[in-house]
Amino acid sequence: MPRALITGITGQDGQHLAEFLHTKGYEIYGLVKGQNNPKVAALLAEFPFIKVVHGDLTDFSSLVAALRQVEPDEVYNLGAISFVAMSFTQAELTSNVTGLGVLRMLEAIRLVGGEKKNPIRMYQASSSEMYGKVREIPQTEMTAFHPRSPYGVAKVFGHHMTVNYRESYGLFACSGILFNHEGPRRGYEFVTRKISSSVARIKLGLQDKLLLGNLAAKRDWGYAGDYVKAMWLMLQQPIADDFVIATGETHEITEFLELAFQCAGLGDWRNFVGQDAQYFRPAEVDLLVGDASKAERQLGWKREVDFPALVEMMVRHDLDVEAKRAK
Ligand code: NAP
Ligand code: F7E
């Protein structure tokens, strides 16, 4: 039975990945931070097969201890401060967790991996935010980075460290450059979930208005359930490499609004949406669109859920969630 250690298990991708690896027969360990993390009970209620290990990406010795305890075949490093807006106000924390955390995990694997017969394979959760002020359209594995936030800068550090440890020490370490991926498990702080949950609340008469920031940004939005399969595929290859995972389509936030309000039968989104300065960022990533042809060719990966289906999935889910909460 292959064994996986997932950091960021309580997050959106951690949950999707655990669900997927379970179908593949994996024994799954999740690294959980904090002394009484409130997300753990809900996680274990939904996924009773997950085994919890305590540790933190800012604490090297806890990572070494976790690796020695679990003896994983594969490590998926998904843990991060992942909210770009927060990275502007807590830049040092973001650099420590999202950036240096990758180095700590690589070092821990180098140390503990040397004690194992079969080398540990590692997946690093890199991000399209690394492209920032994009140098070319669409973005590929070869496109130069120009990050626009402390989060993006930290991810660039983690990406280069992953490549460096692979080249310097022969670690089987892959960097997946994933474009935005969403779904019903998305955190409420991100724009898609903020929209789908607000649409549901407006429909149910629980909220009047939705306040957002920059509506002109364009993103390449896919479904998280499709993207975690690519993470696993990367670690099944004979040679470690880096891959862009994206849909190849870009949509403005207004298009997400249009479909989400339509889906709930609320008509024109402009009647409900306003703007608030607090949601604008000091620097913005205006347009992202990825070229995943390398992943399609070499991994045989393809997205299954398209943009309208994603919006509908999120709105329908939140209509259920909010209706249950309102009871
Ligand atoms: P998420 O929902 O925000 O989850 C982040 C996870 O990181 C949570 O489980 C969180 O634990 C954990 N974490 C935070 N600080 C930690 C620390 N000091 N030590 C250990 N774990 C810590 O993020 P996601 O959307 O699932 O994304 C997963 C990964 O992919 C992240 O690295 C993200 O940056 C990257 N990524 C995401 C996207 C996307 O569109 N979703 C795209 C590209 C890359 P708590 O819940 O206990 O705080
Ligand atoms: O913002 C704009 C905002 O926070 C998307 C993370 O998973 O994907 C995510 O980062 C866009 C931005 O995601 C609001 O300014 C407008 O242009 O949903 P988001 P993100 O910043 O793209 C990447 C790939 C990651 O790696 C990250 O970890 O929407 N926007 N108004 C808003 N955004 C938010 N959150 N809230 C608003 O009210």
Image: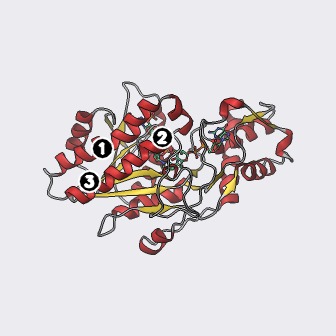
Within the image, what quadrant is residue 269 found in?
Answer: top right
Please give the name of the residue rendered at 69% of the width and 43% of the height, measured from the top-left corner.
Answer: 196
* Residue nearest the viewer, comparing 276 with 240: 276
Does residue 241 appear left or right of residue 151 in this picture?
left
Residue at numbered disc 2: 151
Does residue 274 appear left or right of residue 285 in this picture?
right
Q: Crowding at label 2, few (<14), some or many (≥20) Cα neighbours within 10 Å?
A: many
First in sequence: mark 2 vs mark 3: 2
First in sequence: mark 2 vs mark 1: 1
Please give the name of the residue rendered at 22% of the width and 39% of the height, measured from the top-left corner.
Answer: 64
- Residue 12 in the image, given as x and y percentages of width and height: 51, 45
Cβ–Cβ below 8 Å for labels 2 and 3? no
Q: CA distance from mark 2 to mark 3?
A: 21 Å
Which residue, as the protein is rendered here, is positioned at the far top?
35
First in sequence: mark 1 vs mark 3: 1
Q: Crowding at label 1, few (<14), some or many (≥20) Cα neighbours within 10 Å?
A: many
- Circle 1: residue type: Leu
- Residue 59 in the image, given as x and y percentages of width and height: 29, 32
Q: Which mark is residue 103?
A: 1
Quadrant the N terminus occupies: bottom left
- Circle 2: residue type: Tyr
Disc 2 on helix, strand or loop? helix
Disc 3 on helix, strand or loop? helix
Residue 1 visible? The answer is: no
Ligand 2 neighbours mark 2 (CB distance < 8 Å):
yes
Residue at numbered disc 3: 165
- Residue 217 in the image, given as x and y percentages of width and height: 67, 48
* Residue nearest the viewer, comparing 220 with 327: 220
Q: Which mark is residue 115?
A: none
